[in-house]
Image (cartoon, rainbow, N blue to C red):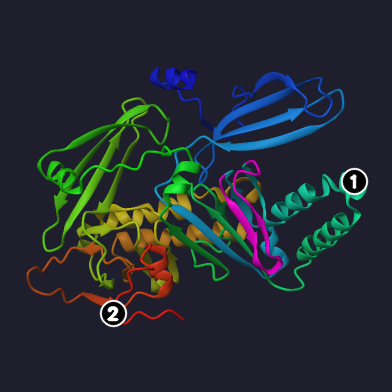
Amino acid sequence: MSLIAEMNVRGESVFKDLSADDEDWLPTEIQSLCMNCYQDGTTRMLLTKIPFFKEIIVSSFSCSNCGWSNTEIQSAGRIQDQGVCYTLRVQSKQDLNREVVKAESATIRIPELDFEIPPFTQKGSLSTVEGVIDRAVAGLEQDQPARRQLDSEVALKIDDFIQKLKELKRVEDDFTLVIEDPSGNSFVENPVAPQKDEALTVTRFKRSPQQDVQLGIRADDDLEQEPEDNTLDAMRNEVLVFNTNCPECNAPASTNMKLVQIPHFKEVIIMATNCETCGHRTNEVKSGGATEDQGTRITLNITDVSDMTRDVLKSETCAILIPELEFELGMAALGGKFTTLEGLLKDIKDLTVTKNPFVCGDSSSTDRVLQLNQFGEKLDQIITGELKVHIILEDPAGNSYIQNVYAPESDPEMTIEKYTRSYEDNEELGLNDMKTEGYQED
């Protein structure tokens, strides 16, 4: 780790984009012990970056003596602010080809078989849904010869279960794949992006203290918290600065944090990071107030290019919808942002089109690339005022905002609705024990 930090300070990045054109970027080879025959083998390590999985360490071991080999992926990026849970309803064989990034901290479940792979029992991997099933089958088959010698009855039951796992790949009946990752670094592909994937549900959740301990970001005895009143007073009166690492090159950097009052709305916390090593800049916004009693749905009718200058506060719990484009972006996909409407649309384009890893390389398809490029062109038309659409911010926490340019009068092009949160909304916000009026659990 000291070597990585030193190289970043010198302005170099040990994590580079994976590219076949960079012939100088070769893996590091290390002589290591083969755990199969206990003779010397070779481990190759490559430090690289892929979208949606941040920085990763790809390692591959091979032994020339016995022929045993192994591959492994470890996340080298930062742990996300929230955990993530992907629930995929597998309905066809095409769903088996969806790309899956599984972090080491992720739990995999198939409820129909009452099957679960606990966290930290498998190394991180970049695979497909079919690959996840094959890896589970290989893990169960590994010790079957020894089981047949020691307990033939148990081995027979495992054989039956392995057969059930293999039958899932025929997709004769629908089944559910759940990947729950408290680190937030796992991912399941949406093949119809930027449209909403009806078969895939993505939810974000707040980690428990026990999960923070498992991830190594909290000590077992670290339960003391700074008094809230003192923290808020300090943030109101000054800009707080704390040390961190650049999310792009991992070099030491500093983050500025300030509590700001938005006119006709509420207080928000703005955090900005500027890396002097690589020049990367990030900004993030979190609500400075409590969760509202009801959710908020803001609908803006874009009628003129001047609407692009409206200030927008999108909290990390806010979803974005553009009905005319059949587009929906789930909560936490862009994190919390305080920007303009133009800036928000450009961030959406970067996420779904410009920086989408599934429109290039082996994972791309002509239809998908064409569809995403057409979507990007429509976003450009909205920004230039050529296409009239409605932008909807739906925030179950009630902490999002679009500037009313007619304030203090009402805005004729904007409607703000309050609604009662559903059970799923309360679960994502961690409010299961704080049920609001009119709330009922199904």
x, y percent for residue 235: 16, 43
Q: Which mark is residue 437?
A: 2
Q: Residue 322's quadrant in the figure?
A: bottom left
Q: Is residue 36 above or below residue 100?
A: above
Kind of residue sitting beneath label 2? Glu
Label 1 Cα crowd, 10 Å radius (few <14 / some 14-19 / many 20+):
few
Q: Mark 1 or mark 2, which has the lower sequence index?
A: 1
**Would residue 200 be found to the left or right of residue 240 on screen?**
right
The answer for how far apart the CA atoms under marks 1 and 2 are is 59 Å
Is residue 365 shown to the viewer in this render? Answer: no
Task: Find out whether the residues at labels 1 and 2 contact each other: C-beta distance under 8 Å.
Answer: no
Is residue 109 shown to the viewer in this render? Answer: yes
**Magenta residue span:** 105-123
x, y percent for residue 147: 87, 48
Q: Residue 301's quadrant in the figure?
A: bottom left
Residue 249 is covered by the magenta coloring: no
Image point 35% across, 61% down: which residue?
317
SS assignment at label 2: loop
Residue assigned mark 1? 145
Q: Which mark is residue 4?
A: none
x, y percent for residue 142: 82, 45
Residue 119 is covered by the magenta coloring: yes
Relative depth, front residue between 358 and 44? 44
